[in-house]
Every structure is written in structure tokens, then in C-alpha cells.
Image: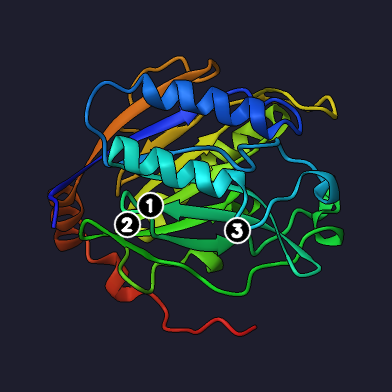
Amino acid sequence: MKETLVVALIQSHLAWENPVHNRANFTQKINSISSKVDLIILPEMFTTGFTMNAVEVAETMEGNTLQWLTKMAKKVDCAITGSLIIKEEENYYNRLIFMFPNGSYEMYDKHQLFTLAKEEEVYSAGQKELIVDYKGWKIKPLICYDLRFPVWARNTADYDVLLYVASWPKVRISAWDTLLKARAIENMCYCIGVNRIGLDGKGFEYNGHSDVYDVLGNSVLGEIPIEKELILYTTLERSHIKKMREKFSFLKDRDDFQLLF
């Protein structure tokens, strides 16, 4: 069990519907990380951008990106996570892969589909939560629009880290900033959000604002150039979670409920 978890957030432009280019881009960025990290986080649909053209760009669980994730995680001896478009039988999923350094992985399919972009007409919604146990840390990964639905994130399992990968547009970025902070406060956990930057193939603009909030909702990254392409580093401390939860026992007062599907 590690007392600290070193995390790298890669905030990047995404080439529209071009997995080859995007994998090469992230290969270069990951290889540029010179210090030892435990977890690398990529944005939502990091191989294509947030596209509804699943028929043309979807991959399988045996496809090039899964092979790439396996290779890169082993090479840098670090877990890597992000979401991509996966086809299984006749269904398409916005699927997050949490790839471990040993080549094993866990996965989460986006539950709250973005109806404003008609995501529900293309993709199937996930019906299963995921909490990853990694180096003794309990991590709950979610995807973009999930951020607007606090019940889906409610910390009933005493997880340590809530993690969102996203393609959150500039026009609504204030909601992103506010909700990430709120999810950290109400769940008494670290909350990490990794968003993309740049223009997509539909002309929508993204301006990053990737950040990490502690149990009290304070940004742990400080003053950063939040609208640029960059790699952000942070160290999560288990002692912070323990100290704050002992001092402020708010989670003990939470409602007991179960999600029904």
C-alpha cells in the first residue's frame, strides 16, 4: 500500500478521428515524462475526439489502441487510463480502460450519455460502476457528462479518488470547474478532472482546465496555465484523506441507498 500516488494529467489537443496520429502524439508525451509516476490520465475518446461517427472509428478490445495501452503501460511501468470507442457485437461504447503495468486492465462504460449531442443514439450506456484497487488506492473512474450526476458518484464505498476524463467544451467550462470542486467536497475525496484542448471536427472549442481538488475542495495544482497543452503532475497523500475524514466525519452522515438499473 502506497502512502502517496504520483499522477500525471495529459491535457492535449486531439486530432479529429485519427487514432494513428493521436497514439503517436501520446506516445511522445508519455515518453517525455522523466520522473517516476504511478498513473497517467488521458482525456475522453483520446484516439478520436468526441465523435458520433462510431461506425468508422470504433475499435475492438483486441484492436490497436488496447495493444498500444498494454505496451506503453509495461514500458513506463505505470498505469494508464482514458476512454475510447469500442464495438462489441452490434453495440458501441464510450469505454474507459484502466491499464495496469502488468498488462491486465479493468473497464468502465460511460453511464450518463450526452443527449445534447445525441450520444444515446449511437452508444450504449454502461450499467456497472467500477472502483479500481491500485497500489492500495481505491479509484472510481467516470467520464465527462457523468460529472453532472452526483448520485452516480456518491461515495458509498469509501473510495479515495474520483477521476473524470472529459471532452468538456469551453462554452460550459465554468460548470466543469464548479462541479469538480463540488464532487471532491461532497465525497471527501481527491477529485481529478482531465479535459482536452483545441478545436474538434465539428468546430467546438475546448480549453482544458484540467485540475485536482483535495478533500476540502482546494486545488492542489496551484497557479497553472490551464488552457495550454501540457502535462500536469500531482502527488496525492493518503494522510490528507485520513486526517480530514477523522476531523470532519461528514461521510458518516450520508444516506444509505442502492442504485437500481
Name the image quarter holding residue 33: top left
Residue 126 as seen in the image, left or right of residue 210 = right
- Label 2 sits on a secondary structure element that is loop
Residue behind mark 1: 185
- Residue at 70 percent across and 25 percent down: it is 15
| Percent position of residue 218, x then y | 33, 37
Q: Report the amino acid beneath label 2.
A: Met
| Percent position of residue 49, x then y | 70, 35
Q: Is residue 181 visible?
A: no
- Label 1 sits on a secondary structure element that is helix
Residue 61, numbered label = 3
- Residue at 51 percent across and 62 percent down: it is 107
| Percent position of residue 121, x then y | 87, 60
Front in this rendered view, residue 36 or 178: 36
In front: label 3 or label 1: 3
Residue behind mark 2: 188
